[in-house]
Image (cartoon, coloured by chain):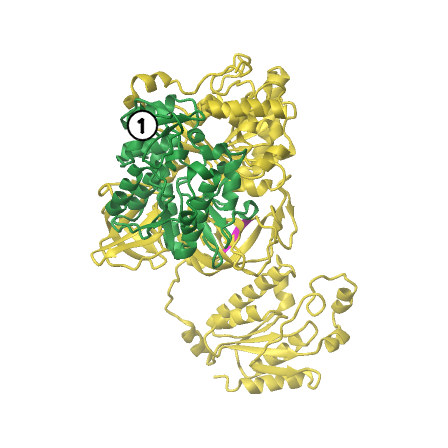
Chain colours: A yellow, B green
Amino acid sequence: MSDVPPHNSIYKTDKLIASDIDAYLNVHQHKSLLRFITCGSVDDGKSTLIGRLLYDSKMIFEDQLATLESDSKRMGTQGQEIDFALLVDGLAAEREQGITIDVAYRFFATEKRKFIVADCPGHEQYTRNMVTGASTADLAVILIDARKGVLLQTRRHSYLAKLLGIRNIVLAVNKMDLIDYNQAKYDAIVAEYTSFANSIGIDDFTAMPISGFKGDNITERSVHMPWYTGQPLITHLETVALDNDADQTKALRMPVQWVNRPNLDFRGFSGQIATGTLRPGDSIRVLPSGKTSTITKIVTLDGELSEAVAGQSVTLCFADEIDCSRGDVIAAADNPPEMSDQFESTIVWMADEALVPGRAYWLKLGTQTVSATVQSPKYAISVNNMEHMAAKTLELNAIGVAEILTDKAIVFEPYVNNHVLGGYILIDKITNATVAAGMLHFSLRRAQNVHWQATDIGREAHAALKNQKPKILWFTGLSGSGKSTIANEVEKTLNLLNRHTFLLDGDNIRHGLNKDLGFTETDRIENIRRVGEVAKLMADAGLIVLTAFISPFRAERDMVRAMMPEGEFIEIFVDTPLEVAEARDVKGLYKKARAGQLKNFTGIDSPYEPPENPDIRVNTVEMSAAEAAEHIVRQLMPLK
Amino acid sequence: MTKTLTHLARLEAEAIHIMREVVAEADKPVMLYSVGKDSAVMLHLARKAFYPAPPPFPLLHIDTTWKFKAMYALREKAARDAGMELLVHQNPEAHARGINPFDHGSLHTDMWKTQGLKQALDRYGFDVAFGGARRDEEKSRAKERIFSFRTATHIWDPKNQRPELWNLYNARKAKAESIRVFPISNWTELDIWQYIHLENIEIVPLYFSAPRPTVTRDGMLLMVDDERFPLKKGEVPVERSIRFRTLGCYPLTGAVESMASTLPEVIQEMLLTTTSERQGRAIDHDQAASMEKKKQEGYF
C-alpha cells in the first residue's frame, strides 16, 4: 500500500456513517443523479481520471485494490505506481491489448450526488460508442493532454457532444503535472479551444487544469495551481444544472407505453413523463387522435400522487373513455406537439452494412414504431473538421443529413427541444440489428402545423365561370421524345376552342421556381413534387394545366395523381424509343451525356420508368406532333 | 418550480420504464427470481410498474436444491404477496447425477444454474427473461447492455450486442432467440440497500446478523444450514454471529461475522467495509475473468 498516491476522500461523511447511520441515510436518500460522459483516449489519461474518481470516492475495495496493485506491477504501464486505468478497462481481451472497445458505465457518489459515468473509448468505433454514451449524458468531460493541446480528436469529441445536445461541456486539461502546472500553456490551450468551440456553436463551456494521476483539482483546488480560481472537477459535477430539472419546465409530453387494464373498472395509461409536470385536473390531449380529456388520478402502488414530473414513470386515469394506446402521446391540451411523416434528420450510422437509401427500416421513436425510408443523404459530415461532403450512402460511423419518410405520421418534436420525441433508432427489418441513431430537425410538411383555411369561392366556382372541367394533362417521356412540342400543339388547339389553359414546361420551371434543384434522384423527386403542387393550384383555379416533364419515376407521377380528384389527372405517355430520341437529340444533350459531360441523364445513366397504364399514349414514330396533338384532344372530348 | 428527483427516484423510474417496454414488446416474458436482495428489489419494482394489475409475467426460480432454508420460505411468500405465479425448475440431470457443491465445485454451478436456466427457458418458451444483474458487480459487467441478446442456443456474443441510445430499447429478435433484460443495471449495492430500507422491502433474514452454526474452510466462513453439510473429521460447527452480504447456494456463499441486525446497521457495515461484494462467492475466484466466461456460456 506504500506506493498508493495520497488522496482526499470525497466521502467526508465517514464519521457520520459510523456515528449516526440514520442521519447518513437521510443525506444519501436526497442525492440527485448526474449522468456524464468522458471523452478521450487512454493517452489523455481518461481511464486514469475515472479510476481516480472511483478511488477517491471509495468505490474501490481492498480486494480490488490488491488485484489492481498486482496488475499494475505486472503490466508495468506506470512503473511501480498504481495504474488506475486498469480499474476500468473491462473485458479480458481488451486488458491484454491495452484498449477499451465499448461503452462502459461506472458509478460513484459524493455527498451531494450520485454519478453514472459513460466511459467511451477512443480508436475505431469511436463515433458509435460516443454517440451511445452521450445520448443519456447531462455533461461531457472532454479531456486534453496538456502536452499536446487541442487535437483532431478533441474537435471530434466536442462536435459529437454538441450533436447529441449535451448542454454542459467541461474542458479538462489533464496532465498539468507534466507541464509543470504552467499557466501560460494552459491559457493558450483554452484560447485555442474557445475559438474552435464557438465555431461549432458551443457557446459555453467550463475549462479546468487537472491531473488525474496526481489528483490536482479533482476533489480540492490544487496547491500547485494557485492561479486557477475555478472549482475543482467534483465540485463542478456536484453543482451543474440537471437536464431533468429543465425538462420539467417544458410542456407536458408522455409517450404511452402500456395500457393497464386489470379489470373492467380500471383503465390506466402507463409511461415515463418525457417533459413537463402534471396534476389531477389538468387538461390533456392524446395524439394522434387529438381527443381531449382531464387527468383524474395519478396511480401508484404507494397511493395517488398530487403531482408528477418529467422523469417519473406513472399510470394516469382520464375522466373520459377516449382511445389511447401504446405509441400515443399524452400532451398538454393547449400545447400539443406536431405530427408529420417527412423530416430532415441527422443520422449516425452504426452498422457494418451501409445505409441503403429507399430501403424500409423500422424507426422507433419514444414508444412509436413505424416503417421508414431514408433518402440519399444531402451530405455527410466529417467528424474531423465538420465539413460537408457529398455522400450517396452512410457507412459505419458516418454522420449525415438526410430526409426520412415514415409510412404514417408520427408525433414528434425537434431533437433540440425534446430528446425523447426527437431521437430515434433505425432497426434492420431482417437482422433486427440497431443500425442507426437519428435526431429529427424539423418536419418537411408544414401542412401538419398549418390548418386549411376554408374559402367561399371554391374550385367548382372557378371552373363554372370558365365553363370547363379542370384537368392536368401530364406529359411524360424521355428527353427529346416530343413532350413540349406536342403539349404546345395541344394548348394551341384548346385555346382555339376557348379553353382556359396553362402550360408548365420543364425547362422553363427550372429557370425560376425550381432553379435550386439539380438532377439527382432526390432533386428530381422534389422537382416533380413542386410541379404537382403548382399544377394542382392552377387546376383549383379552374384551368386545364399541361405539364411537360420527363418525370421518370412512377412513384412521383402516382403521387401527383393521388393529389387530384378522380379523373382530373390525365397521364399522357409520349412513347418514343431511346434510339429515336437520341437520334433526334434536338438540344445535343444525349451527345453530352454519352461523353460523360452530363450526369444523371434519363435513359443513359438514370432510369426511366414508363407508365404501365397511361390514360393516353402517343407513338411519335408513327405520328407527327400535330397528329399526336389531334389524337390527344379527341380523347379529351368533351371538355365540359 | 422544479422538483429535483432523487437518484433513487430516477433509478426506479428507469427500471419501471424498462419493464413496461418488455411487457409491451415481448411475446412471453418471465422474471428470474433468486430470492436474494436484488430479486426482492426487482419484484418490488415489477409490482410498482404494473399496479393495480399484478405483474403480467411469472417468476422463475432456477433451483439448485442447495439454497438456504430461509430462502425457500420467503420464495413462496413473496410470490403469493405479489399475486404472481411461481415456477420452479430443477435440472433433472443434475438431480439424477447427484451434483452438489461439495463434490463437484464449478460443475455444480454449471449444471444446476447455467444448464438449468437454459432448460427452463426452452421448456416454457420464454423469449425475454428479466435478471437482477448490476453493472457495478464485476468489471466485465460494466459494459453489459440492459437488453442482452442470446442466440437460439443461449450464447452471448459480445460482438453482436446492440447499441442502446436514450431510453430506446430494440426488443426485436428472430424466433428462438432470446433477450436477458437487466432493469437494475445502473444500481449500485448501496442503492439496493438504500431502496430496500426506503421502501421497506422484505428480504431473507440471513442478511441480518444472528447466531448461526458455522465452520471455516479455505478462509471462508460457511454456515451449516442442514444435515447435508458434510463435516470433515474433527470439524465441529461453531455458533457465531454472522450474516450474508450475498446469497447463493449455501456452501458456496461465505458469511461475514457481524453484529448488524437491522437494515441501517447492515448498510453502515457495508459502507465501512473494505472488501467488495462478490468476494464472498467462490465462483469468482475460480479463474481470472471467470464471470465473463460464464456469461458467454449462458450463466447470467
Judge left or right: residue A305 versus residue A548: left
In the orientation shown, which residue stands out farthest toward the left? A265
Q: Is residue A39 left or right of residue A17?
A: right
Q: Chain of mark 1?
A: B
The residue that appears at 52% across and 22% down in the rendered structure is: A66
Callout 1 secondary element: strand
Give the camera-side residue of A617 and A56: A56
Position above or below: A141 against A562: above
Q: Main secondary structure of the magenta part?
A: strand
Nearest to the observer: residue A482 or residue B52:
B52
In the image shown, does B40 or A224 lie closer to the viewer?
B40
Whether the magenta-drawn stretch holds residue A344 is answered as yes
Examine the rendering and report whether any part of residue A56 can be seen: yes
Pinpoint residue B77: horizontal percent, then vertical percent. Answer: 25, 43
Q: Residues within 10 Å of mark 1 (few under 14, many from 20)?
A: some
What percent of the width, then of the height, locates residue A504? 59, 70
In this image, B258 relative to A465: left or right? left
Q: Residue A79 at x, y = what percent?
A: 63, 20
Q: Amino acid at mark 1?
A: Pro
Location of residue B273 with respect to A478 vertically, above or below:
above
- What is the magenta range? A343-347
Q: How many marks?
A: 1
Q: Which residue is mark 1?
A: B213
Picture coordinates of residue A344 (x, y %)?
52, 52
Residue B49 painted magenta: no
